[in-house]
Amino acid sequence: MHNFKELKVWQKSVDLAVDTYYLTKYFPSEERFGLVQQINRSAVSVASNIAEGAGRNNFKEFNNFLGIASGSSCELETQYIIAHRIGLIDSNDFEVITSNVNEIQKMIFKLQQSLPI
């Protein structure tokens, strides 16, 4: 249906996942199976659902997976807020990473609005 690798929102989502892994690498080891795992999974889920939706048979299915990706981005943003509040992410990193999440959320919404469903 769509070549997901050409979608800017997918490209930015992959970049976000990579940035997330770099950021969470510095979290305390006791968070390895807690918040680190949750944050990394949410970040990967955004890009993965965009890709999976793009590979589906019709725009309705694509839209559904974009909705899941949007939900994962909200989950990720929430986890970043928690990590920031408990002191795992400094204010500068928090502002940068959540700005990227918000940009992706807007891109997903615009892509959904553009689909002929």
Image: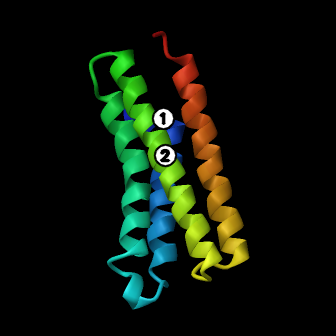
Which amino acid type is marked by label 1?
Answer: Leu
- Packing grade of label 1 (10 A; few <14, some 14-19, many >=20) is some
Please report contact status of discs 2 and 1: CB closer than 8 Å, yes or no.
Answer: yes
Residue 17 in view (yes/no): yes
- For label 2, the residue is 11
Quadrant in the rendering for residue 59: top left
State the quadrant of the N terminus.
Answer: top left
Instruction: Classify 77 as above or below 88.
Output: above
Return the mark for residue 25.
none
Colour scheme of the picture = rainbow
- What element does badge 1 sit on? loop
Q: Relative to the observer, which residue lies in front, 3 or 52?
A: 52
Q: Residue at x 43, y 47 (%)?
A: 46
Residue 1 in view (yes/no): no
Quadrant in the rendering for residue 80: bottom right
Instruction: Classify 63 as above or below 11.
Output: above
Q: Residue at x 54, y 27 (%)?
A: 111
Q: Relative to the observer, which residue lies in front, 28 or 86?
A: 86
State the quadrant of the C terminus.
Answer: top left
Q: Is residue 58 left or right of residue 78?
A: left
Q: Is residue 25 left or right of residue 85?
A: left
Residue 92 x %, y %: 72, 73
Residue 102 x %, y %: 64, 48
Instruction: Classify 1 as above or below 10.
Output: above
Quadrant in the rendering for residue 69: top left
- Packing grade of label 2 (10 A; few <14, some 14-19, many >=20) is some
Return the mark for residue 7.
1
Distance, label 2 to label 1, CA atoms, is 6 Å
Residue 101 x %, y %: 59, 52
Q: Residue at x 37, y 75 (%)?
A: 34
Which amino acid type is marked by label 2?
Answer: Gln
Q: Residue at x 59, y 36 (%)?
A: 107
